[in-house]
């Protein structure tokens, strides 16, 4: 991040570390207590805000463990007036029954932006700040799973990119993980920048990117839209 020029990125999306205290196959999710976690995040957040353009936005995905602490930290680093939304990801039905608390069925995404950022209204008017999408460990409808802990559905990231960027904009992810951000950006004809401390993350992302043909994706999307319009027209006359 320190090597990147200021005001150079249009959109940042990061599925950050949750600080679960666990070690997964591909990464360690241990940042200490919540205060120590914020101390770890602070210099990274400052750099994110520096590199984002005056028309840019930052979306950070997290869960209940850090969301309240992160909101306070982001208000401090990005500024209170830069807050736009807390987006709730309703993940549907979970089966994590406990006699101590209610089932957890949502995660959060904090959306902050520079003063001149404007969302794409033609896309955004389809959504509120509550998104209902099943997590991949519940329903992998499109065979997306690549065996990387915490992988998000591509539709989730595509919504962010469609709402807060335009074609040929630069989208960045500094917690790249399974590479979904770069994959979604390429499919939507955005430029992309991704990095991760884990070499497997980069290898996996490059492999996924090599399978994508944006022109083919757009053609399939147009065909699907045309087919749906034909179906909607059936029986109208």
Image (cartoon, rainbow, N blue to C red):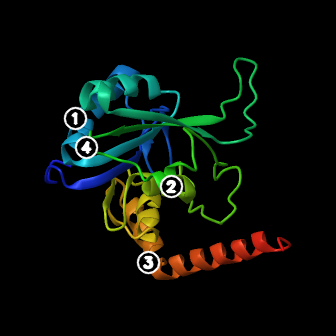
Horizontal side of 40 relative to 3 (left or right) equals right
In space, the residues marked 4 and 2 are separated at their CA atoms by: 25 Å
Tell me how far mark 2 sits from mark 3, CA to CA.
27 Å
**Left or right: 8 with respect to 205?**
left
Tag 4 secondary structure: helix
Looking at the image, is mark 4 or mark 1 earlier in the sequence?
1
Above-or-below relation of 87 to 33 = below
Checking the image for residue 48, the label placed there is 4
The mark nearer the N terminus, 4 or 2, is 4
Q: Nearer the viewer, residue 176 or 232?
A: 232
Mark 4 against mark 1, which lies toward the viewer?
Answer: 4
Q: Is residue 14 left or right of residue 90?
A: left
On screen, 47 above or below 178? above
What residue does disc 3 label? 210
Question: In the image, 149: left or right of 85?
Answer: right
* Residue denoted by label 1: 43
Residue at figure coordinates x 66%, y 66% from the top left: 142
Q: Residue lying at the far top in this picture: please name it.
A: 100
Q: Name the residue tied to disc 2.
A: 123
The answer to which of 82 and 8 lies nearer the viewer is 82
| Residue 33 in sight in this render | no
Q: Residue at x 41, y 41 (%)?
A: 60
Question: Is tag 3's residue or tag 1's residue first in the polypeptide sequence?
Answer: 1
User: Badge 1: how crowded within 10 Å, few (<14), some, or many (20+)?
Assistant: few
- Which structural element holds mark 1? helix
- Which secondary structure lies at badge 2? helix
> x%, y% of residue 222?
58, 77
Q: Quadrant of the C terminus?
A: bottom right
As measured in the structure, the alpha-carbon distance from the residue carrying label 3 to the one carrying label 4 is: 28 Å
Q: Are marks 3 and 1 in contact (CB under 8 Å)?
A: no
- Residue 105 appears in the figure: yes
Disc 2 crowd rating (10 Å Cα; few below 14, some 14-19, many 20+) is few
């Amino acid at each position: 991040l320190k090597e990147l020029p200021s005001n150079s990125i249009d959109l940042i999306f990061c599925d950050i570390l949750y600080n679960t205290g666990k070690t997964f196959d591909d990464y360690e999710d241990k940042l200490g207590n919540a205060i120590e976690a914020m101390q770890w995040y602070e210099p990274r957040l400052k750099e994110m805000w520096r590199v984002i353009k005056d028309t840019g936005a930052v979306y950070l995905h997290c869960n209940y463990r850090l969301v309240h602490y992160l909101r306070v930290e982001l208000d401090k680093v990005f500024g209170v007036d830069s807050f736009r939304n807390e987006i709730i990801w309703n993940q549907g039905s979970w089966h994590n029954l406990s006699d101590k608390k209610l089932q957890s069925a949502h995660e959060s995404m904090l959306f902050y932006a520079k003063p001149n950022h404007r969302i794409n209204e033609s896309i955004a008017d389809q959504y509120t700040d509550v998104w209902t999408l099943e997590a991949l460990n519940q329903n992998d409808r499109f065979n997306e799973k690549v065996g990387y802990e915490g992988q998000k559905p591509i539709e989730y990231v595509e919504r962010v990119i469609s709402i807060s960027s335009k074609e040929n904009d630069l989208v960045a992810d500094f917690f790249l993980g399974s590479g979904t951000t770069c994959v979604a950006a390429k499919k939507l004809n955005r430029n992309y920048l991704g990095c991760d401390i884990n070499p497997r993350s980069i290898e996996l992302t490059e492999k996924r990117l090599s399978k994508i043909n944006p022109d083919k994706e757009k053609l399939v999307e147009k065909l699907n839209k045309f087919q749906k319009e034909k179906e909607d027209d059936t029986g109208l006359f």
